[in-house]
Amino acid sequence: MYDTPASGKTAVTHEVKIAARKVNVFYGDTHAIKDVDVEIEDKTVTAFIGPSGCGKSTFLRCLNRMNDTIDICRVEGLIALDGEDIYAPSIDPVQLRAKVGMVFQKPNPFPKSIYENVAYGPKIHGMARTRAELDEIVERALRRGAIWDEVKDRLQEPGTGLSGGQQQRLCIARAVATEPEVLLMDEPCSALDPIATAQVEELIDELREQYSVVIVTHSMQQAARVSQKTAFFHLGNLVEFGETGQIFTNPHDPRTESYITGRIG
Amino acid sequence: MTLFAFLILFAAVVIGYILNLRAARAIRAGGTKLHSLDGFHGGFSALVTLVPTFFFIILWLMLQGTVIESMIKAGLPDGTLDGLGTGQVQLIMSEIRSIAGGRIFGTPEEWKLEAAERLVSLRSTSSLLLVVLTIALTAGLILLTRKTVRAEFRARQGVERIVLGLMVGCATVAIFVTIGIVGSLVFETYRFFEMVPFTDFLFGTSWEPQIPLREDQIAAKGAFGMLPVFLGTMVIATVAMVIAVPIGLFSAIYLHEFASPRIRAVIKPVLEILAGVPTVVYGFFAILVIAPAIRSFGTDLGLPIAPNTALAAGLVMGIMLVPFISSFADDALAAVPRSLRDGSLALGATQAETISKVLFPAAIPGIVGGILLAVSRAIGETMIVVMAAGLIAKMTINPLDSVTTVTVQIVTLLIGDTAFDSPKTLAAFALGMVLFVMTLIINIFALRIVRKYREIYD
């Protein structure tokens, strides 16, 4: 069972959920992330922006140790979740990933029914003792994924039969079903049409009430629309990190300004 | 002379290609824009020359024997062949042929010598005619295609159409061969069932096919009940699958999910070597290593074990099928998109949960298809069981007993002195039919499963 800590907090500044200090990532000989320091706050949407190949997705995947599945990837430095080093030997990446959920670029529902897709996480973590409890968890997750009304009558149909936008919201519902504390989203709208994108963005805004959300995006408009904090990555460096409004209207670093105004990309 | 005809054809193809290529280039050099590239004009000529002439030569070679023979027959003195059976006529014709080939036995009759001489001269005329006609045909086709080289001529479409036709031809060859095989099988099986009742064969529990070939021979009376033989096949195939399925699947999962690249680099080639071992070598292995080992193990336990047990043959057959199943399962696992595995891991699933709950279900159609194909191979496998399984058909499902299989019986029925009108020999075809129907059903089933689930999972 995972409790959502510090619920009910409404102040503008939130406590730090994830802190990264001097993080370096190597893919074989390639130095993908260079000395990144960042603090991700609770109940906040943090956007990672930057040109392709700047390392923002790589850094995102460090936060739930998904990079462990890549043999040649090596992570150095400290990443702490609630003050605890997630790369410490005592940390089980499996349990970490239950706390730090992830939504991928391309919707990837399992070839199972809609119900089974959402119930997958709760089942493997033993979150429900009875079928009724599981039904409740699934319904809650689907409602939070803003897809309940569309699928409530066909929960037993395959999740792969949904449209792209529905699939992505199903994947978000699947991720929130395990009650994570942080939700990582790797370009969640890049495979979606504008209407589906708007739905997912609205959903992200709602999710902020309960989770710390980190979103990687290529679209600066999207970052401006959904996030409170923005980090700009360039060539593996974290160039600038601050309030979204400030980054977009009054960037301190000339590289950020160039990117935002479209001169580099 | 035949070789000469083919050489002419080859030369004609090259000449036609070059002529058309040059002509096309000349037009292009003149400033006109051609519809097709120069190479297609050349290729068009080459193909138009090659295909009909090639088939002409082949057809000629196939038919000349029969045509010449009938001409020889017609030229024999009147009444020589009157009242003779087909066998005797064939005998005379083959004697004439061997005389023509220079092998003369005894003193043949004058008319046979004459016929042989005529045969020799007809053959040389035929060869000469073939070469002359080849030259004429190729020359005609080259001229015909040379005329087509014009700016607006669609040579590319022409070439594509001919190549398409060739591909269709190749594809239909397989169909016709299948029809031919099934046809002959059905025909011989039908003859068998004219002698032995259908129900006796299908439901009989006794298989003793050693019936007398001649009147004075002493042999069993004969019984053609396929059940014990069929049961033997099933016992051995079951043993084989019990060995092959778990080993194949687990090795595939290990190699695909857990093995480090270095271990994979060793095990994969070893599995490929295993797949390349000839079945006759597996047979050695079964009789020289496995069977004695099982026997001595049984003696230690005080069990009476036959020297050629179903277990030994099944074990070795199972080992043979391991790389087969393993590579199918490996392909099926590799075909599952990486995003599904990532999605599962990102939800906090362990690797074991990811494999058993996501990867495996998604890969199951490919795996089941592979297993069913392995079953049909186990049923049809011949060499291992011929060497390692028994010959006596017993109604038993005890894998420690000696059993025989459908394929072993087919082999034993068809080797040695055989007469193709006795039920003993024809029984082999009936067994072959049973085997064919069984593997066909399994294969259809396998393909059905693979196709049905693939649609859902994509």
Image (cartoon, grey):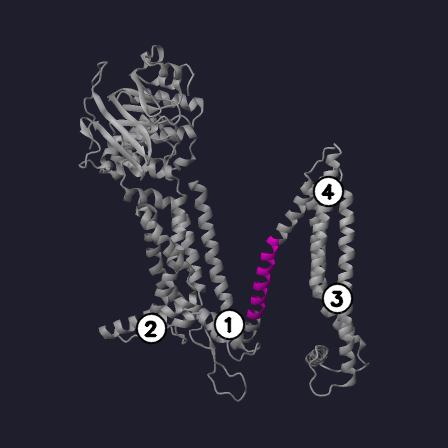
Q: Quadrant of residue A176?
A: top left
> Disc 1 designates what residue?
B428
Chain containing mark 1: B
Which residue lies at the image location 71% right of the left edge and 54% below the top edge?
A: B11
Q: CA distance from mark 1 to mark 3?
A: 42 Å
> Disc 4 designates what residue?
B22
Task: Establish whether labels 4 and 1 are both on one chain.
Answer: yes
Tell me the kind of residue under disc 2: Asp
Tell me the kind of residue under disc 3: Ser
Residue furthest bottom in the image: B216
Q: Earlier in the sequence, mark 2 or mark 1?
A: 2
Magenta residues span B170-189
Task: Establish whether labels 2 and 4 are both on one chain.
Answer: yes
Q: Earlier in the sequence, mark 3 or mark 4?
A: 4
Q: Is residue B144 left or right of residue A75?
A: right
Q: CA distance from mark 4 to mark 1?
A: 61 Å
Q: Quadrant of residue B277?
A: bottom left
Image location (x, y in percent) of residue B246: 33, 56
Tell me the kind of residue under disc 1: Ala
Determine if the magenta segment contains residue B178.
yes
Q: Earlier in the sequence, mark 2 or mark 3?
A: 3
Image location (x, y in percent) of residue A94: 24, 37
Q: Main secondary structure of the magenta part?
A: helix
Q: Earlier in the sequence, mark 4 or mark 1?
A: 4
Q: Is residue A160 among the parts visible in the rendering?
A: yes
Which residue lies at the image location 31% right of the left edge and 40% below the top edge?
A: A71
Q: Tell me the number on the disc at residue B401.
A: 2
Chain containing mark 2: B
Q: Nearer the viewer, residue B407 or B95?
A: B95
Label 4 crowding class (10 Å Cα cut-off): few <14, some 14-19, many 20+?
some
Tell me the kind of residue under disc 4: Arg
